[in-house]
Each structure stands twice: as structure tokens, then as C-alpha cells.
Image (cartoon, rainbow, N blue to C red):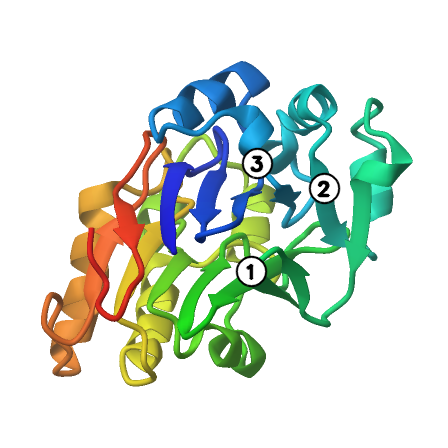
Amino acid sequence: MRAVNLSSGSDGNLTYIESENAKILVDIGLSCKETEKRLALLGVSGDQIDAILITHEHSDHIKGLDVFASKFKTKVYAHVDGWNAINNKISRLESTQKWSFSECPFTIKDITATAFKVPHDSSCCVGYSFTCGSHKISIATDLGKIDENVLKQLSGSQLVYLESNHNVDMLKNNPNYTAMLKNRIFSSRGHLSNLESAKAISYLAQNGVKQVVLSHLSKENNRPDLAYTEVCNYLRNLGIQEGVNIKIDVATTEPGKIFKISKRLSK
């Protein structure tokens, strides 16, 4: 398997995952044109995508869905509890393109996908774990808190894309954010802070996870270098060394590193 985040953050989220036989997108928060452009960097064309898996209906996750999926007749998967909200924002998809799931695993060629609900202020938001043989990649962004089930789903992954949305002090002191908006982000249905992400990573580092990519950073209330430093400092204080016990990278709005999942993670 290999995976690459092609865009991350409130301007648009797009992650590409492939196995020997399957090519999938998780979310499509960029325009169809931009999505095709970024896939081309990987040598992949739009008509090669087997499926698009949606986490939730917010525009930074489905902006390009209608145009892309209708153009290439791509199958679109979303949780059964989330389709109504998604349907309110799209109009071009045929009913045969829309696939629903619950929390039961389902397959896309040789990839098995398992969705798990996460707390967020949408109609229904999910994370995903993808397995192919002994390889596992997981994604959990847009969530206000980490619970035992989320940790269970992420454990054992060679690669995890995990939200690290904001620095608490930057958000508290942001004069452009109303108190209501700050409370929404801080809530259990909002977004994970760098510190909350670090706490989750300290658990994952002891439960089989080898690589974490900090994702969905706020461009107003965080910075890549700050998120990385804050997480690594927290881990270091617990005796967990970045680069030794676990590797940490940061996703941005630009295409990131390509991770190849084999017996050993490479990039």
C-alpha cells in the first residue's frame, strides 16, 4: 500500500490511498480540476479512482465531489447516517454511484475499509481504517475528542493521519474569532488541539503505530512547526522519542510525502 495527503486543512482535504489493485480517495475537498492536477503528480488519472470515501458533509471535504464523481462515474461511499446531509449539497450523482455503510467492514477490491464514528459538529462524521493483508492505514480528522473506540481503531496502524488542529493559546487569543466560534472548536464536537493530539499519539506509540501525520491544521490558529514541536515536546517528556519510537510529520495544503507501507514503513 501507499498513501499521500494531497491537501489538508480548512481549504480542502484530499487523501489518496492505493494497494496493488485499488485506488481510493478519502474526501475530495478540492475542485475537480485541482484534484485531477494533484493526482497527475502521482501518475494517476481520475478514471482510475475506484471509490471516494467521505468522512462528512462539510464543504472542505466534499467541494469537488459532485463534478469529479459525475465526470468519472466514481462510486461514492458514505455512512448511512450522513447521506441526507451530503445529498443536500450535491445534485449530479446517479443513485447507482451512492453506496452506504454502517460500522461493518466493507471491501474495495483488495482493501478492507472500516469506518468508525467520531464526535464532530456534522450530521455524521467518521474516521477510517484501511487494511490490505497485514498492512493498515488509518485516518481520523475533524473530531472534538479521542475516546477508547477511536484509539482502538487507530492502534496497530503503520500510518495514521490524525488531526492536530490548533494551538490552545493561539485560538484563545485570536481576536478575529468570536467566543461562540472558539467554544465550538474547543468543544467535544469541535477539533483536536495539538496537546490532545499529542496525548493520543503517546498511546498509539505504545500500541503498534509507527508513523503519524499531523493533519487538518488551522491556518489561523496553528503552524506546522508549532504543531510538530508541541507534539514532540510532549512525547519527549514521556520518554517517547520522535524518530526512534515513532515518526511525526505534518500535512499542509500542499501535496505531502508518499508513504509506502510494506514490512517496514518507507517514504
Mark 2 or mark 3: name the one nearer the start of the chain. 3
Where residue 49 is drawn, which disc sits there? 3
The amino acid marked with disc number 2 is Val
Disc 2 versus disc 3: nearer the observer: 3
Counting from the top left corner in percent of width and height, residue 223 is at: 26, 41
Depth check, front residue: 213 or 257: 257
Please report the residue visible at 13 percent of the width from the left and 78 percent of the height from the top: 237
Disc 1 versus disc 3: nearer the observer: 1
The amino acid marked with disc number 3 is Ile
Q: Residues within 10 Å of mark 2 (few under 14, many from 20)?
A: many
Q: Is residue 125 left or right of residue 167?
A: right
Please report the residue visible at 27 percent of the width from the left and 64 percent of the height from the top: 211
Q: Is residue 241 above or below residue 58?
A: below
Depth check, front residue: 171 or 229: 229
Please report the residue visible at 57 percent of the width from the left and 80 percent of the height from the top: 149
Counting from the top left corner in percent of width and height, residue 66 is at: 72, 25
The quarter holding residue 256 reads top left
Q: Is residue 228 left or right of residue 29?
A: left
Give the residue at mark 1: 110
Give the Cα distance between marks 1 and 3: 14 Å
Mark 1 or mark 2: name the one nearer the start of the chain. 2
The amino acid marked with disc number 1 is Asp
Q: Residues within 10 Å of mark 3 (few under 14, many from 20)?
A: many
Q: Is residue 49 left or right of residue 261?
A: right
Give the Cα distance between marks 1 and 2: 17 Å
Give the residue at mark 2: 76
